[in-house]
Amino acid sequence: MIFLIAVILLVFLSAIYHLFMLKVEAKKYKPAGKLFEIDGHKMHITGNGEGTPVVIMTCGSGAPSAYTEYCNIEPQLSKITRTCIYERPGYGWSEPASTPRHTEQIVEDLHRLLEKAQEKPPYILVAHSLGAMEAILYTHKYPEEVAGIVIIDGTSPYKHINYLESSIPIVFLYLLRVINNLGLIRIVSELELIPLLNRRLSAMPKDIGPVEKAMIYRNISNKMIIKEGDSLKEVAEKMYKVLSLNDIPLILLASDHSMKNLPGWEKSQNNLLELSRHSKLEIINGPNHISILQEHSTKIVKEIELIINTIRQEHKSMI
């Protein structure tokens, strides 16, 4: 009985400390870019560098922050051209939204955000994981704005219809949210007991690591992320066999680990290849789905630079 009371007390103190630290971290880590109001909530976007086409980067489902996700990629790209990292509601510094979190709404959010931020097309959309769905739908709806797409270990409508078992169960996300609200993820993280997180942090710049942790404690498995997951199959069924990218260049960079171990991943990549008449797939050896952006940034930047140069050659007026 005494042991049970002690455990309850420790969990209670952990939750109180977690709430206190969230306030401290909110003051310490200010938005890296600018906030723009969209439908009553503020969305975060960074903008660096000069030139066209503009590279727009978006993260996958459950990532704590797109800004930290691309911390090894954006600094290299911004030396070449204009870059933007944007964060969906509930990610990074973006506020939660009252609007639905299906892909159609996410695309409209991004379109309005880019207009408010006065970013000018043509764009190259760079997306990781679930972000592939919004990059594809954005291009389908606004083909005149998009000059190319680079998808990094991305999902497809085919995958979300036929291989739901490879997605994280919603029940697990709710459980993860409860554990985080109790401050327990903070504790095991600070004790370096999460190998996957340790691997991510070791591949990030030292000044980004603390921001990544703060964003995890703030955003992991929040309502926005859960709502995105809830709508995936319905959205995928609407998108499947309707979308077409025609001649817009599409580069797919897939992790060999994902191709071998995630159900339906190879078929999903092949399905994406069929969307454009100018598409290619490259397998990157070594990384897993979570670590690919941090551990293979040089390879990813090289592929994005190739598509930038190709587009500039085709449109000599670009600077």
Image (spheres, rainbow, N blue to C red):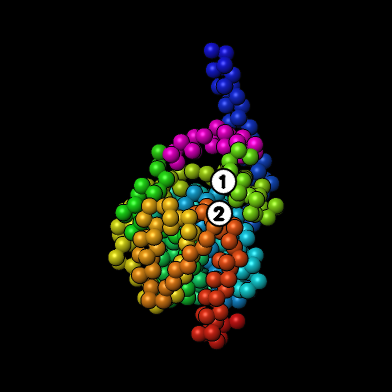
Secondary structure at numbered mark 1: helix
Instruction: Using the image, determine if residue 241 lies above or below residue 171.
Output: below
Residue 239 at x, y percent in the picture: 32, 62
Question: For the residue marked with disc 2, what is the amino acid?
Answer: Ser
Residue 91 shows up from this direction: no
Q: Residue at x 55, y 32 (%)?
A: 182
Q: Pointer 1: what residue?
A: 196
Label 2 near label 1: C-beta < 8 Å?
Answer: yes
The three-letter amino acid code for the residue at tag 1 is Leu
Task: Give the image quarter of residue 105.
Answer: bottom left
Crowding at mark 1 (Cα within 10 Å: few <14, some 14-19, many 20+) = few
Residue 293 in view of the camera: yes
Relative placement, left or right, of 42 versus 79 is: left
Q: Tell me the CA gap for discs 1 and 2.
A: 8 Å
From the viewer's perspective, tell me whether residue 215 is left or right of residue 245.
right
| Identity of the residue drawn at 38% across and 73% down | 276
Q: Which residues are magenta?
A: 172-191
The mark tally for this picture is: 2
Q: Position of residue 295 (x, y in %)?
A: 59, 58
Circle 2 residues within 10 Å: few <14, some 14–19, many ≥20 = some
The residue indicated by pointer 2 is 291
Of 164 and 70, which appears nearest the observer? 164
| 252 falls in the magenta region | no
The x and y percentages for residue 129 are 46, 57
The answer to which image quadrant residue 52 occupies is: bottom right
